[in-house]
Amino acid sequence: MILRQLFDHASSTYSYLLACERTREAVLIDCVYEQHTRDSALVRELGLTLACTLDTHCHADHVTGAWLMKAALGSQIGLSPTYLANNVDLPLREGQVIRFGDHSLEVRATPGHTAGCLSYVTAEHTMAFTGDALLVRGAGRTDFQQGDAHQLYRSIREQLFTLPDNCVVYPGHDYDGRTSSTIGEERIHNPRIGGGAREEDFVGYMENLGLPHPKQLAVAVPANLRAGEPEDGKAPRAPEWGPVITTYGGFKEIGPEWVARCRDDVHVLDVRTAAEFEGELGHLACAQLIPIEELRERVTEVNTTKPVVVVCQTGKRSAMATLILEMSGVVRCANLAGGMVRWRELGLPS
């Protein structure tokens, strides 16, 4: 099974992309609205079909990216029906099984952090995606959204600590950079509920955390009750000048076929050396040559009255050049995917 753990720095949220290697069918757990471009790029680059997004609960510290994923990729949205949220396609309850290719996730109800918290456990009981119910050496706060420390104690004890010791715990958050743990570790070492802690101990600990409410609470909860749909029902606008995509590596790219069709609508900037420019791969008609080593000092020479398409041999130097342009204030720019090598392979004119 393919597994990718993704991180949002602003909210310290972990998202998880799981996929079947054979069928390429995938699910995405706890995606973040602001990370939609990154996450959808990863789905695309790995050649996956996103079947559904699964939220472990109605988050209070970030807005889910579930609606954006559905709008972009057609994936279904899964969440506990406890929240009565809009736009939910899969109302998930205890004992349901979510299948993706040769793999599946078992839904376990783990309320307590909020009233509708769910955890997702692989069929082999080797991995548990615990949201905010069980964290690495911690547990989710229980002081808002119908939280209940007594209920969370029972959820962890009965639904999670009954899993095998070597079952890997993948939490919904971590604020200290810890990425995972195991059920066995948490059963022994978790300072809130491990080591034989009794219910009274756990409840006393949780009810005296004294934490401030999440900064995004007033924004996140209403948005998440719409599965992340903006109030105006509109997705963020993509660049209008061409079919630009952002890669998982964070670079803006545009396909050579489109550039060949719309050559007069863009300004081509070639960042190779002069020898390469006149070499075997040739160059695009009317391309401006500024070697990448000189670009920072000569950026004002670039014609920005049209969108700028940057090219090199294979698209690596030109990707770096787009960042240089962006840092210099050039908004409409993109890397020519595959560079001149790909251009020639497609038989496009040079």
Image (cartoon, rainbow, N blue to C red):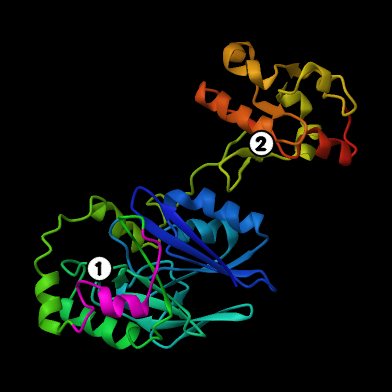
x 69%, y 28%: residue? 309
The magenta region covers 178-196
Q: Position of residue 185 (x, y in %)?
A: 33, 76
Amino acid marked by disc 2? Gly
Q: From what the image shows, is residue 256 above or below residue 194?
A: above
Q: Which numbered disc covers residue 140?
A: 1
Q: Which numbered disc covers residue 242?
A: 2
Q: From what the image shows, is residue 227 above or below residue 275?
A: below
Q: Secondary structure at mark 1?
A: loop
Q: Is residue 122 magenta?
A: no
Quarter of the picture holding the C terminus: top right
Amino acid marked by disc 1? Gly
Q: Position of residue 83 (x, y in %)?
A: 31, 72
Picture quadrant of residue 163: bottom left
* Left or right of residue 72: residue 264: right
Mark nearer the viewer, 1 or 2? 1
Quarter of the picture holding the N terminus: bottom right
x 62%, y 27%: residue? 321
Nearer to us in this view, 211 or 77: 211
User: Can see residue 304?
Assistant: no
Q: Is residue 195 magenta?
A: yes
x 15%, y 67%: residue? 143
